[in-house]
Amino acid sequence: MAMRSPIFILFILSVCGRTTNAIAQAKIVASGLDQPETLIIEHGKTTFTTPTNMPGLTVKGKSDALHARAQIHRTAEGLTFDRIEASLAVETLATGIALRDQHMRQEVFTAPGGKIPEIRFEATNVLCPGVLAGRETTCKIAGSLNFRGIPRNFFLMLKIRQANPASVFRASGDGSVKLSDYGIEPPTQFGVKTADEVQIHLEIPETATTIAPSGK
């Protein structure tokens, strides 16, 4: 049998690669997974923690009222978030001490003029490669966090798991916010001062996607 030249071999590998990718794309199209899908989260959980100047004392708070909406589609590489919009009403955040909650809203969340805008996050065109049924994947979500009416860049490390059926997803995420980036002085109460950096954790319950009717 005649030996094939390296150029011929590379050509065959290239054709096979394109064919494999075409088959994968064809499977996605055939299954309808190339269609835009929507994830709507009604009761996601948000927690925050920040250390203080007192050893061993940490301020913690939580809310079960995170609302989010994500437009997604699937490719051979994984999952793409075309757009993510999330919001949280400040009034739903609680630390377990009413006086501290009131102080937190006044010192941290009240914008000039006396209004308390909701916390908002937006991101577009984010690829999460390797999202497959029964597998957990971590991807970096880069977007804008609007805090006290001021938008700043924000990064969230999102762990996302696609369940069976494949239309159901569950996720959790972690990020951090520096109050000074928003012109906020870390609040002090009774001699206890919080740190500048606040750790944020999100929990998104299992949620099924919906597919928009064709033509919409």
Image (cartoon, helix red, strand yellow):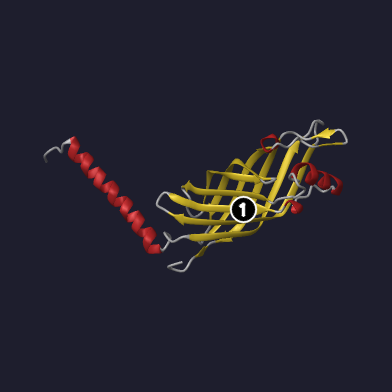
- Residue at the far right in the pictured view: 190
Which image quarter: residue 27? bottom left
Amino acid type of disc 1? Ala
Which image quarter: residue 169? bottom right
The correct choice, above or below, for 44 with respect to 7 in the image is: below
Q: Nearer the viewer, residue 113 or 37?
A: 113
- Residue at the far left in the pictured view: 2
What residue lies at 51% left-to-right and 57% top-to-bottom? 71
- Residue at the far front in the pictured view: 113
Answer with left or right where residue 44 lies relative to residue 192: left
Q: Secondary structure at mark 1?
A: strand
> Picture coordinates of residue 152 (x, y %)?
61, 41
The correct choice, above or below, for 202 with respect to 184 in the image is: below
Q: Which residue is mark 1?
A: 86
What residue lies at 84% left-to-right and 34% top-to-bottom? 192
Answer with left or right where residue 178 lies relative to residue 141: right
Query: Dot 1, crowdedness within 10 Å: few (<14), some or many (≥20)?
Result: some
What residue lies at 32% left-to-right and 55% top-to-bottom? 23
